[in-house]
């Protein structure tokens, strides 16, 4: 799979297959104000991944601690309120067959993206935060979106090499391409090849049939993120623009402050993700699902 990178373009990044990265979500968003039990173990990937400026490096332990231990009071204070930064809620398709992996009773969650994609970079923040409420991450790596793409060098993490353990969720992720170009400068270097099932899921759901804001015939927007194939995003829930000139450590530390506009956007999105998972786990664990912030998201989504 190949695609031509955009060095400077008014439209979002393109997937390695030539499909838009988060396009439909942000066509409908105005100007974004720039602001500062048994554990299911899923090995997400293997091998070495090249980043924009170095080989794969593990994320700083203090940053991951801040990212994965957001105080409950912050989730409850924010709920789904993000008055400065627009947050796009997921599409709900409650009648779809529930996604599971490996015949597990847990909720199947799939993240499909690429390291070069700025919208993927933005979406990983609330994904990591939300899933930390249900399980434990390991081997998250530092990453940033492509320096040659729209919203260059958006600070983020990579799911390449990562593992996730949870009693309630089985997570699979795909980082389809690196954030570096090949020697000819004509395409991003491939990284992970999706399985047949992952491809089937994306092909079925990542299109205008399930996302009415997409143009007719449009398909393949990334990041694609599905919770049990009933709660889904195609594109990011928040704009990469709000991460401009921000450092990972500063963003992570600010997650303790519910009045920080970027924190509000990340946490509101994380509450939506949490509510989506709780809707398919029979509201378990109650210590997470019965909290005010999650209930606010559940109500907002009509779950």
Image (spheres, helix red, strand yellow):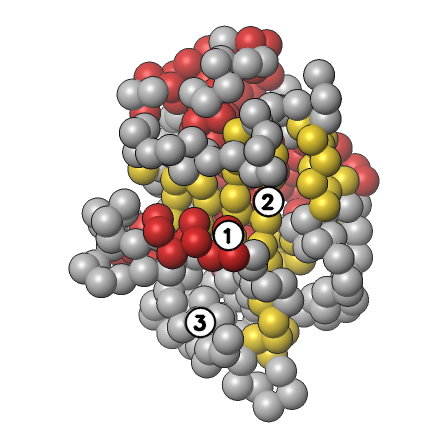
Find residue 172 and name its label.
2
Find residue 38 and name its label.
none
Do the CB atoms of the residues marked 1 and 2 lie less than 8 Å apart?
Answer: yes
Q: Secondary structure at mark 2?
A: strand
Closest to the observer: 210 or 12?
Answer: 210
**Relative to 232, 54 lies left or right:** right
**Relative to 28, 291 lies left or right:** right
Q: Secondary structure at mark 3?
A: loop
Circle nearer the viewer, 1 or 2 = 1
Give the answer, above or below, for where 108 lies relative to 25: above
Closest to the observer: 163 or 152?
Answer: 163
The residue at the point 72 percent across, 35 percent down is 41
Task: Please provide percent x and percent y for residue 156.
Answer: 62, 51
> To which residue does mark 3 refer?
17
Instruction: Please tell me which of labels 1 and 3 falls first in the chain.
Output: 3
Q: Image quadrant for the C terminus?
A: top left
Give the answer, above or below, for where 100 lies relative to 239: above
Find residue 198 and name its label.
1
């Amino acid at each position: 799979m190949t695609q031509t990178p955009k060095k400077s373009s008014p439209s979002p990044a393109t997937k390695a297959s030539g499909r838009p990265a988060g396009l439909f979500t942000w066509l409908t968003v105005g100007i974004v104000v720039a602001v500062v039990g048994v554990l299911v173990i899923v090995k997400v990937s293997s091998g070495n991944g090249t980043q924009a400026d170095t080989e794969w490096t593990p994320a700083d332990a203090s940053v991951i601690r801040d990212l994965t231990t957001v105080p409950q009071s912050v989730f409850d204070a924010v709920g789904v309120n993000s008055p400065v930064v627009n947050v796009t809620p997921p599409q709900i398709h409650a009648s779809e067959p529930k996604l599971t992996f490996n015949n597990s009773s847990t909720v199947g969650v799939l993240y499909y993206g690429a390291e070069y994609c700025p919208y993927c970079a933005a979406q990983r923040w609330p994904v990591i935060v939300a899933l930390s409420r249900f399980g434990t991450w390991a081997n998250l790596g530092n990453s940033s979106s492509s320096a040659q793409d729209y919203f260059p060098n958006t600070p983020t993490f990579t799911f390449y090499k990562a593992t996730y353990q949870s009693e309630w969720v089985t997570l699979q992720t795909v980082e389809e391409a690196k954030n570096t170009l090949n020697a000819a400068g004509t395409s991003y270097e491939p990284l992970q090849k999706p399985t047949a099932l992952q491809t089937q899921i994306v092909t079925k759901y990542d299109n205008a049939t399930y996302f009415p804001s997409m143009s007719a015939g449009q398909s393949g927007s990334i990041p694609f993120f599905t919770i049990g194939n009933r709660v889904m995003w195609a594109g990011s829930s928040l704009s990469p623009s709000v991460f401009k000139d921000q450092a990972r450590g500063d963003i992570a530390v600010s997650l303790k402050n519910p009045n920080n506009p970027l924190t509000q956007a990340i946490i509101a999105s994380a509450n939506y993700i949490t509510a989506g998972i709780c809707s398919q786990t029979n509201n378990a664990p109650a210590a997470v699902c019965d909290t005010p912030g999650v209930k606010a998201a559940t109500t907002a989504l009509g779950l």
